[in-house]
Image (spheres, rainbow, N blue to C red):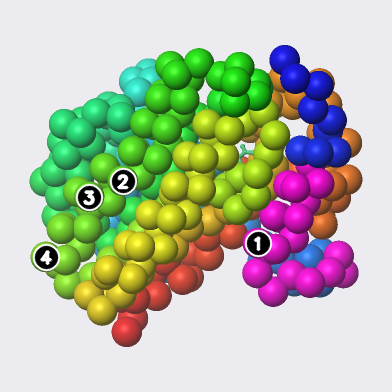
């Protein structure tokens, strides 16, 4: 493995995070102006996403799961996928036990037939797709470009970039037919800056940013809004694996971010602004 210093990776991350935190120009603002994540509690069927259908790729754990729970808590019908069947059913059951509506559909976003069946399944079950959160993704193990195998490159690109392409390819016609919708793609700080040692991940996330911009241009006049979010470091097993591989820790990484802490998955939902995702329906 190449000797890449933490500073070389994390300074880039800090720059990315600072640039991406919209309207956040300093530490004081970042700490005082952040909205508050929805409090866990019984689902409210008359919540702000009452009757809205939300499709999520990769909600068997962490950011996707937290998003599924939050939308369901606000009255949405959530249809989500992931490959780990037992976890998927567990998440769906937990949401239903909380009074929410959720359906798990086993699907691998690398497979076109799976993505098509997943999107069709949502329309069959709930009739439409108001909001799609294309979140499924994997990290790459550390290594320089010369060290990475083609297999790693292909798997990361196929999951992260092709997965978002395929998801939008099948979501957009549904939204066109129903007259509008909202798509949010989960990119990353890595979609804006280079991080040494994670070229497959970084390239795949840059591709997501690019696909998002193109889709926004192609569909803005069809009442379909397409955006991406770019979380910095989020406390999930994915991050913990990356920190272990980089031989660094939470505190050290946190110091390179404006908030000086690692955020929780629930805070990414605030980042995607739940009011904004439903906004088009009011217009
Ligand atoms: N954690 C961070 O610091 C961070 C920062 C910026 C962006 N992100 C992005 O946030 C997203 C979620 O990551 P996370 O941190 O919440 O990690 P995670 O817990 O590993 O979540 C990844 C999700 O994607 C799903 N997934 C992976 N490959 C898939 C495939 N081929 N088909 C269908 N689903 C697949 C996983 O489900 P199955 O394994 O069940 O398939 C899981 O539900 C990723 O796109 C990641 O790049 C994370």
The circle drawn on residue 169 is: 3
Mark 1 and mark 3: Cα distance apart in space:
26 Å
In the displayed structure, 30 sits above or below 120; it is below
The residue pinned by badge 2 equals 165
Number of numbered discs: 4
Mark 1 and mark 4: Cα distance apart in space:
33 Å
Q: Are marks 2 and 1 in contact (CB under 8 Å)?
A: no
- x and y percentages locating residue 109 in the rendered image: 31, 33
Classify 10 Å Cα crowding around label 4: few (below 14), some (14-19), many (20 and above).
few
Q: Are marks 2 and 3 in contact (CB under 8 Å)?
A: yes
* Residue sitting nearer the eye, 161 or 129: 161
The circle drawn on residue 20 is: 1
The residue pinned by badge 4 equals 177
- x and y percentages locating residue 70 in the rendered image: 49, 51
Mark 4 and mark 2: Cα distance apart in space:
19 Å
Q: Is residue 263 visible?
A: no
Mark 2 and mark 1: Cα distance apart in space:
23 Å
Give the residue at x 75% y 47%.
Answer: 12
Label 2 residue SS: helix
Classify 10 Å Cα crowding around label 1: few (below 14), some (14-19), many (20 and above).
some
Specify start and end residues of the magenta stretch as a single range: 10-28
Classify 10 Å Cα crowding around label 3: few (below 14), some (14-19), many (20 and above).
some
> Residue 19: which quarter of the image?
bottom right
């Amino acid at each position: 493995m190449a000797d890449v210093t933490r500073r070389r990776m994390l300074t880039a991350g800090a720059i990315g995070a600072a640039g991406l935190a919209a309207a956040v120009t300093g530490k004081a603002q970042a700490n005082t102006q952040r909205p508050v994540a929805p409090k866990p509690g019984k689902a409210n069927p008359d919540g702000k996403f009452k009757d809205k259908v939300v499709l999520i790729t990769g909600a068997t754990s962490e950011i996707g799961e937290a998003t599924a729970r939050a939308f369901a808590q606000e009255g949405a019908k959530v249809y989500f996928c992931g490959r780990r069947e037992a976890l998927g059913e567990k998440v769906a059951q937990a949401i239903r036990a909380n009074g929410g509506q959720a359906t798990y559909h086993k699907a691998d976003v690398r497979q076109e037939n799976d993505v098509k069946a997943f999107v069709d399944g949502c329309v069959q079950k709930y009739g439409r797709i108001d909001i799609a959160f294309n979140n499924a993704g994997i990290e790459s193990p550390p290594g320089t470009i010369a060290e990475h195998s083609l297999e790693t490159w292909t798997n990361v690109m196929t999951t992260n970039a092709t997965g978002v392409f395929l998801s939008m390819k099948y979501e957009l016609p549904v939204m066109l037919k129903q007259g509008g919708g909202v798509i949010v793609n989960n990119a990353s700080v890595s979609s804006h800056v280079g991080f040494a040692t994670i070229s497959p991940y970084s390239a795949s996330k840059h591709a997501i940013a690019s696909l998002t911009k193109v889709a926004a241009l192609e569909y803005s006049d069809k009442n379909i809004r397409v955006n991406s979010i770019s979380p910095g470091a989020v406390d999930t097993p994915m991050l913990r694996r990356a920190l272990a591989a980089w031989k660094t820790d939470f505190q050290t990484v946190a110091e390179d971010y404006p908030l000086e802490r690692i955020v929780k998955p629930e805070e990414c939902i605030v980042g995607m602004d739940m009011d904004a995702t439903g906004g088009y329906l009011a217009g």
